[in-house]
Amino acid sequence: MQNDNKRFVERDRDWHPPAYAPGYKTSVARSPSQSLVSLQTPSASELTGPDFRQLRMGRYDNDLLMNFREDPALAGSAGLPAGERIIMFGRVVDQYGKPVPHTLVEMWQANAGGRYRHKKDGYLAPLDPNFGGVGRCLTDEQGWYRFRTIKPGPYPWPNDVNSWRPAHIHVSVMGPAISTRLITQMYFEGDPLIPLCPIVQTLRDPEAVETMIGRLDMARSRPMDCLAYRFDLVVRGELQTYFENQ
């Protein structure tokens, strides 16, 4: 935890990878070819809202073992998803360790076989008829969030001859305005695919990679049920989690 009197911490541009990283092939087409435009006069919609404190959550919005089959619109079946059951939890805090309450945390992921429920995912692993792969929750007064889900599987992608993504869960944290939404990924402690991933390799600083790794927490695990992984999110300052869209 930091001292509140600590000086303002300027963003470290070396913390984030270059927009153009040929080893990560899709960055070649997506990287800007011209100078970025600075918005000197943002509109009110870019500076305020939405306020999620009054958002009503569903009973199983943060429980991916249950939310797919409980939503009639998703046409889930009555079974439970296949795979290793886990709890993903942590706190959203600022650089001084102060909690960020009532902020929306969303997550999405592949199933245990490494396949997303998305029309463009053509991986040969089967879809799980009992798993949707999306969840959301609001942080409490102390900044805590929690999800129950299935550990996702790794999957291949056409970056080169044999590229595989490590098992990961995408996480979105909503700031005080729609333009301050932050997105990152949680990898799993000890996964040997992490240092081999071309996306991870775009990061120059090993500490940036460490901020995206969920740590096994046996104290929060449930005996004979599921393991727990803690993934704290630091939204600003020198201790910030690496966020993909900064």
Image: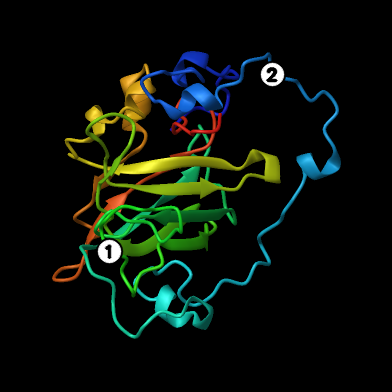
161 displayed left or right of 49: left
* Whole-percent x, y for residue 209 in the image: 34, 29
Whether residues under marks 2 and 1 lie with C-beta atoms below 8 angstroms apart, the answer is no
Residue of label 1: 126
Residue 239 lies in quadrant: top left
232 displayed left or right of 191: right
Q: What residue lies at 23% left-to-right and 28% top-to-bottom?
A: 196
Q: What residue lies at 42% left-to-right and 74% top-to-bottom?
A: 68
133 displayed left or right of 102: left
* Whole-percent x, y for residue 134 in the image: 45, 62
The answer to whether residue 65 is above or below residue 188 is below
Mark 1: few/some/many CA within 10 Å (<14, 14-19, 20+): some
The answer to whether residue 200 is above or below residue 176 is above
The answer to whether residue 59 is above or below residue 193 is below
* Whole-percent x, y for residue 153 in the image: 25, 52
* Whole-percent x, y for residue 151 in the image: 26, 57
Mark 2: few/some/many CA within 10 Å (<14, 14-19, 20+): few
- Dot 1 falls on a residue whose secondary structure is loop
Amino acid identity at mark 1: Pro
- Residue 36's label in the rendered image is 2
Amino acid identity at mark 2: Leu
Q: What colour scheme governs how the chains and residues are painted in the rendered image of this protein?
A: rainbow
Residue 204 lies in quadrant: top left
- 2 vs 1, front mark: 1
Q: Nearer the viewer, residue 127 or 36?
A: 127
- Residue 46's label in the rendered image is none
Quadrant where the C terminus sits is: top right
State the CA–CA distance, disc 2 to disc 1. 41 Å
73 displayed left or right of 154: right
Q: Which badge, 2 or 1, comes first in the chain's sequence?
A: 2
